Amino acid sequence: MNTIIAKTNETPIVITRGIYDLLKIFVNKKKLSRHNEIKLDQELKYAVQVLRKDVPENIVDLGKTVKVKETTSGAEYEYNLVSPQKARRKHNTISILSPIGIALLGYPQGAVLSWEMPDGVKEYQILEVKSIA
């Protein structure tokens, strides 16, 4: 029997009711790896749900630019998170339902998290969160 350990952070994620429902559907449709499915299910179980206007500025959410560092390599990336319909590579935007989008949603600036990407489990630190300019 294979055991999957999906570590979650001590602090619950903060997301809107709409994002919560969207992620719950995503988990139920089995669109994630088993590792990520277990991790996201645990995160959603303890998530703090708020109205869009009450999402703190330092929380990763729809319409935010997020700068992250992959802790192993030290490589830094910046993502502009938008709805799946608005994600366009030429506009440098990425869907909140992309692997990195789902991984980051609800976490505050400064958080360190792990998520299984297509090339293995990666650990990221969120360096900066701001509204898309």
Image: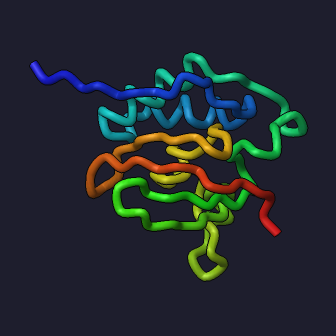
Image quarter (top left, top right, bottom left or bottom right) of the C terminus: bottom right
Q: Residue at x 30, y 55 (%)?
A: 118
How many marks can you see? Answer: 0
**Residue 28 visible in the current orientation:** no
State left or right for residue 2 relative to residue 125.
left
Asked if residue 35 shows in the view, the reply is: yes
Residue sitting farthest toward the left: 1
Residue nearest the observer in this picture, 84 or 44: 44
**Residue closer to the observer: 54 or 26:** 54
Q: What percent of the width, then of the height, locates residue 132? A: 78, 64
Q: How far from the left and from the top, in percent, is residue 109?
A: 67, 46
Q: Quadrant of residue 45?
A: top right
Which residue shows up at 39% across the image and 27% down it? 7
Q: Where 79 sits versus 50, above or below?
A: below
Colouring scheme, one of rainbow, by chain, secondary structure, one colour: rainbow
Q: Is residue 91 above or below residue 69?
A: below
The residue sitting at the right extreme is 53
* Residue 74 occupies quadrant: bottom left
**How far across and down, in percent of the image, does residue 37 sit?**
39, 31
What residue sits 63% from the left and 30% below the top? 13
Q: Is residue 73 left or right of residue 119?
A: right
Q: Residue at x 47, y 30 (%)?
A: 40
x and y percent of residue 95 in the render? 59, 58
**Residue 106 left/right relative to 63:** left
- Quarter of the rendering occupied by the N terminus: top left
